[in-house]
Image (cartoon, coloured by chain):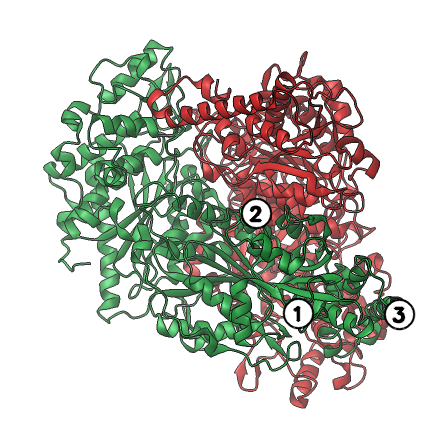
Chain colours: A green, B red
Amino acid sequence: MTETTLDVTALANPTDEEVATVDAWWRANNYLTVAQIYLKSNVLLQNPLSPDDIKPRLLGHWGTSPGQSFVYAHMNRLIRHTGQSAIYLSGPGHGGPAVVAADYLEGTYSEVYPEVSLDTAGLTRLCRQFSTPGGIPSHVSVTTPGSIHEGGELGYVLVHAFGAVFDNPDLLAVAVVGDGEAETGPLEGSWKGISFLNPERDGAVLPILHLNDGKIASPTVLGRKPPQEVRELFTGHGYDVLEVEGSDLPGMHQRFAAVLAEAYGKIRAIQQSARDGDWDGEMPRWPMIVMRTPKGWTGPHEIDGVTIEGTWRAHQVPLSGVRQNPEHLAILEAWMRSYGPDTLFPGGRPSPEIDANNPVGDLRMSANPVANGGLLTKDLALRPYTDYAVEVLHPAAERFENTRVLGAMMADIYRDNPHNFRLYCPDETNSNRLGAVFEVSDRAFMERVTPDDVKLSRNGRVMEVLSEHNCQGWLEGYNLTGRHGLFATYESFGMVSASMTVQHAKWLEEAGHLPWRAKIPSLNILLTSTTWRNDHNGFSHQGPGLINVVLNMRGTVSRVYLPPDANCLLSVADHCFRSRSYVNLIAIDKQPHLQYLSIEDAAEHCEKGAGVWEWAGNDHGSEKPDIVLACAGDVPTAEMVAAAQLLKEWVPDLSTRVVNVVDLMTLPRQKDHPHGMSEAEFSALFTDDIDVVFAFHGYHGAIHKLVHGRPDADRFHVRGFIEEGTTTTPFDMTVLNGMSRYQLVEDALNNTDVTPANAQELREHCRQMLEKHHRYVREHLEDMPEVKDWVLNPAT
Amino acid sequence: MTETTLDVTALANPTDEEVATVDAWWRANNYLTVAQIYLKSNVLLQNPLSPDDIKPRLLGHWGTSPGQSFVYAHMNRLIRHTGQSAIYLSGPGHGGPAVVAADYLEGTYSEVYPEVSLDTAGLTRLCRQFSTPGGIPSHVSVTTPGSIHEGGELGYVLVHAFGAVFDNPDLLAVAVVGDGEAETGPLEGSWKGISFLNPERDGAVLPILHLNDGKIASPTVLGRKPPQEVRELFTGHGYDVLEVEGSDLPGMHQRFAAVLAEAYGKIRAIQQSARDGDWDGEMPRWPMIVMRTPKGWTGPHEIDGVTIEGTWRAHQVPLSGVRQNPEHLAILEAWMRSYGPDTLFPGGRPSPEIDANNPVGDLRMSANPVANGGLLTKDLALRPYTDYAVEVLHPAAERFENTRVLGAMMADIYRDNPHNFRLYCPDETNSNRLGAVFEVSDRAFMERVTPDDVKLSRNGRVMEVLSEHNCQGWLEGYNLTGRHGLFATYESFGMVSASMTVQHAKWLEEAGHLPWRAKIPSLNILLTSTTWRNDHNGFSHQGPGLINVVLNMRGTVSRVYLPPDANCLLSVADHCFRSRSYVNLIAIDKQPHLQYLSIEDAAEHCEKGAGVWEWAGNDHGSEKPDIVLACAGDVPTAEMVAAAQLLKEWVPDLSTRVVNVVDLMTLPRQKDHPHGMSEAEFSALFTDDIDVVFAFHGYHGAIHKLVHGRPDADRFHVRGFIEEGTTTTPFDMTVLNGMSRYQLVEDALNNTDVTPANAQELREHCRQMLEKHHRYVREHLEDMPEVKDWVLNPAT
């Protein structure tokens, strides 16, 4: 941002002329909002309004829109005065027409979509495309220039705003929070963002809580709370609460300009103090604005004797039956003409007075490159991942905490990318063995820090907050503005923010259809502390459901990786950190696990995504083994490798092939996913007709789904998590779910056509071992044996 | 509750003897907590502590435990004084050992689990079972008597507490909120419960925010906020904030007794005023307590020169290496002896002084039948569902808003069950066509009500809040305490609280293994405003992912219903409302859809769960048609019936069979789900070898998963949602996802061995119709045709 001397007084006291400019822009926006909802022709009312001008189906949300455009109009004035780089996030996102109208008035919409030109034809197109087939959704969406936030599923406007300003010191994110959205848990939890926002290094979020009292059919909690309580609530969250209320004009323009100037002045004062080096470390009291305006402000006050403006009835389309009811048609026409379309759009183009309220170029919020973050994305500086390799001399011989190597890698990423990467994690960075990052950066914390705290400071950039919604949402905002990161969480609690993952994927899926949206860093999610190793946490912590959620996404964005060991994790992580616009899900446990591949082998294996492990099987490269033993995931791989070993030892004339799958998306057909193996590749691994016993990390049905359409998919016999869990040993978890080595051996023997010598003896051995194991678990409370016996080794 | 005259003064001022009693109980609890974490033998320290007495693996959470038992101890005193019916919900649920110890001290644990007897053998078992294979989890779980709340996934303690007290006027739910949990979005959003709590009709929740400053490795936001801000925050949420802080003894006993008495006095005063009829309707200011005690209170203050007590270091096991390090062993022994085990457990049994702090019988919080809600569950009064039938003279002829009949049914349920049923819905009861309930009950709202509000009052019992987490959590609490309900939400936003659905299912799955846990009403979730009919809301509102989430659950609890029409919905809903301990997911759209079955036919069809619709197909009851046309869900059924009609008309010599599936769980094998059809039933519908074209409501892969293991499952060709969506016509949604009638016809022709006469002509017709449709969508913005053309009819 260009440093300008901030004249808050001038900003707070608009001249009459300035008010007129802002008001014209606002009226034009309101006019376009109503036109988008109602009109398909005669969009500038050059003729008297006729029923034929009305759209066949009326859709959209009027209620929130005038408040949103009011804020936008005043932000434009602020930007013009200050040169501030800003973006606008619309929480009550169904107010889409207002934001689209803003983009249009700023000229950006026509630049991005030339067919929506700045003339009557373009205006007609603007109206017709709204909320109609072949057009755009009724809420702010990925198609809306300047937006990093889809207003569909509510609750995430503040997390996205905070994520956007982390490490973006010159950015101001204005986040309008609707009072409906403010009822959601994720939104209420996201006010805490300021407890993690550093005024020196980060930009600022200006939350504007827009209380218009109603949601779709009833009032909101915050809309009806006494103002005193609302004030206390946000003072308690740590904000400096500024309030503005009313509907009188031009009074509201003057009062809002004043309150916006005050808020901005406070933000700049906080930042300057921190950046001039005279910050005492006290957590700043950031401003937020509580804005009370009537729902459907400037719309019809009363229709058919019923109050509309200021009530929930203004939420959607306030005036219905417009075609059939001449009175309603007349009300609509009067309403629209009240904005003065003739003077606002002379000759069909926004007037110079409207233009005068637009910032120039990239300072227009709709054109700020931050909101098309791919434009600003810089590759991460990554050292060769081979630097962090674990030495593996013999496969399946030594154990290592897999995620620890990732911690080392991320420590260097923090070192080499001081403004371009952050780790987000509920509160388990250390627990997840990623603690090496603390060599480089502390945890971020703006509340009081005491001498007993460790690796916690104002300057920390590791983000820990016990809220999956905040973690994921901050990362999404960080990604959407072009920066890189990782969200690490307990596997089962990845489901807490699953719907955010879904919505972000939808954003990426649709962005892929828009050439003007540059690709952004991928959303990287690490699931660790997995289902198979949540020994004492028990059943509530055992759930690999997020994998299934990601499998439902389009192939253009969904990626699921199950690295079996540390070196494969390094290769996968390196790939994910370099990738763009995917949802990369990586599931791997933090506990000590067997290592299989040298870093060279891992690189090759991960590159292919799936491959034969000849050393583990017994088919000596033959074209067709008697059985294929497939596995995906650390624990399943360990059990399958052990099963193959048992088979080798006991029934050496059974020809087995071990296939390990790292990239789950190699399994579907190529037409179903771009990573899908070709038919030849698939057959080379799994044959076309030999039975496959598959040990899988997640819910077993996922594999059935993935291999559908592959040759004779019925031959895939999958063992995975079947929702059997409790507080028990890791090995018992595999037994409970039918995936232990002994059960896999039995599956193999049951599903091959050959009957090798010694098969009965091996079955008997497995039976005995399982019996021994069951006895062991039964008698555990009596014996309380040593840890190593039950944590790492099955039934020894 | 027996009305007793409440002597707050006596309650607030415990005698020295009373303090001694409470303190003894508390010390005993703390002792047992430490013993559970550390000891496998010598559990009463009758001998000097030896390394051999220490468990091989130390797991558990000490930090939160003493605070929790402190509250429990004092609640016991309050109950003894007042006869108040109360339950205790432990938010910081990893403090499991404290709650288990409380149950044990109250005698309940031994009553439920006789092997954990009130003697040294039982105590040894109590210690050994904790957090170990064959034992219990380290957090409060379904195995814990008196609990309706699993302390695994954090965030839901208040929603469960509020749900428990709705329509339970005599109940007090004490909900301890940890300061870690308080960082989550769902928890922060759940403070709003009091805005919906009626003091006359409902019971009370007493939230106790336990600020002990730390989570696993760092401080918490609320723990470090200035007390003034914390006060403002909760005052802003509408509470009367009472505070108590310290660690001095017996001072803290006296102060906590005083604050608890004050809170209780305020609750009773609010209730009595409301119930005596002199409530002015002003929303009560319910008390809540902010309790500040050191983390790991009464534990080692310092170990190896590092402060433990009062810091995050006390979170889990504060003292490690106890076996190897004689100094640590000595610290542990001294710590444990500081509680005085000799006097607390003379002869191995809790002393009479401890007993003296226990309430009697069902007043013990661990024995309150409310927390084993199935014991109190009454069947819903349900009128014959046939009363609400839609007349269907000809199948596939008329349209009806399916969920509207459910609204009528629920209106009567509200009528006939004034204290035993509630509907929970973000804010879309009317939008979802369930508005008939408002004939009987308003929406609940305790904040200010104005004359413009409709169907909104203090006395309302329809629960609308724009928070899926609150809606679902309240219903879970309501269910868990034995009452019935329905959570209705937009299909795609069912994912917002998906993890709660998962965790509740886990609770039900595990409860099924515990004979003492009586079955409770099922969790009923209605997904409406579905993927296929979110025309203008667009892609963000199109997502049937919750079906997949429920499919992952165990067959003992998971139920997914896709009624094709209104009469089937009635039959399904009636079944769900009568069922127990399931997760019933019903997906059906609210828009006008074709009706197929008379109420008699619907009853028979739903009873079987799947069946042949002879009138729709063309195989005249033959044993083997040329192709099977299967469908599940309203829109898929409409398209498949239309496809069958096209086939009948154009290629009458192709023998087709239409199979409709209502109960998705009939598809898997019986060994995979109890509803699974027998092999014979499955073959009778789908044959063993004829190809099946399947039109499915959800993500298509779900069917691949469900039919795995059925004869030649590869022959199932599924069309479903493949994540293609936008703002478009309903029919275009089916085209985009390859599920339109024309595409289904092609699938049918492509997957049968026969080549009927006229097949080429039919293909050409379909091609033309699809081309016409594509042209129609392309040109839509130019034409803006009438609604009926594009909403209801494909390419007419």
| Closer-to-camera residue (A418/A224) | A418
Question: Which residue is identified by label 2?
Answer: B266
| Closer-to-camera residue (B520/B273) | B520
Q: Quadrant of residue A327?
A: top left
Q: Residue most toward the bottom?
A: B326
Tell me where residue A316 appears, x and y as whole percent. Answer: 40, 28
Amino acid type of the residue that numbered disc 2 sits on in the rendered structure: Lys
Amino acid type of the residue that numbered disc 1 sits on in the rendered structure: Gly
Q: Quadrant of the C terminus of chain A?
A: bottom right
The kind of secondary structure element at disc 2 is: helix
Amino acid type of the residue that numbered disc 3 sits on in the rendered structure: Glu
Residue A339 relative to residue A503: left or right? left
Marks 3/1: CA–CA distance: 42 Å
Q: Which mark is residue A761?
A: 3
Please determine if labels 2 and 3 lie on a single subunit: no
The kind of secondary structure element at disc 1 is: loop
Question: Which residue is identified by label 1?
Answer: B60
Tell me where residue B233 appears, x and y as whole percent. Answer: 44, 53
Residue B664 relative to residue B540: left or right? right
| Closer-to-camera residue (A40/B659) | B659
Q: Quadrant of the N terminus of chain A?
A: bottom left
- Please say if B589 is above or below B39: above
Q: Quadrant of residue A286?
A: bottom left
Residue B108 relative to residue A212: left or right? right
Please determine if labels 2 and 1 lie on a single subunit: yes
